[in-house]
Amino acid sequence: MADQRKFGAACDAEAARVRAEEGLSEDEFLELELTPELLALLEESGGSLIEIVEEIDLKNG
């Protein structure tokens, strides 16, 4: 559970960084590239990418 929160926090931080860099609002669609760092966190968490995408989709519902 803690690893999933860590991964989620890393995704949120990366999304915020990219939005700021690109001048996007929080409501604008943002497609994140899975960086080596995010992939490592995913691997550490033992989570499924599909589960994480579904969770993000539900949060953004």
Image: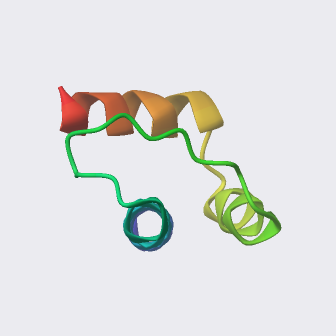
Q: Is residue 60 left or right of residue 13?
A: left
Outermost residue toward the front in this view = 23
Residue 25 at x, y percent in the picture = 23, 52
Q: Nearer the viewer, residue 52 or 31?
A: 31
Q: How many marks?
A: 0
Q: Is residue 18 left or right of residue 61?
A: right
Q: Which of the 4 image quadrants contains residue 20?
A: bottom left
Q: Quadrant of the N terminus?
A: bottom left
Residue drawn at x 73%, y 72% as measured from the top left: 37
Q: Which of the 4 image quadrants contains residue 57?
A: top left
Outermost residue toward the right in this view = 36
Residue 53 higher or lower than 45, as above or below: above
Residue 51 higher or lower than 9, as above or below: above
Q: Nearer the viewer, residue 18 or 50?
A: 18
Q: Is residue 26 left or right of residue 56?
A: left
Q: Nearer the viewer, residue 2 or 13?
A: 13
Q: Nearer the viewer, residue 16 or 6?
A: 16
Q: Quadrant of the C terminus?
A: top left
Residue 22 at x, y percent in the picture = 47, 59
The type of colouring in the image is: rainbow
Residue 46 higher or lower than 44, as above or below: above
Residue 48 at x, y percent in the picture = 62, 38
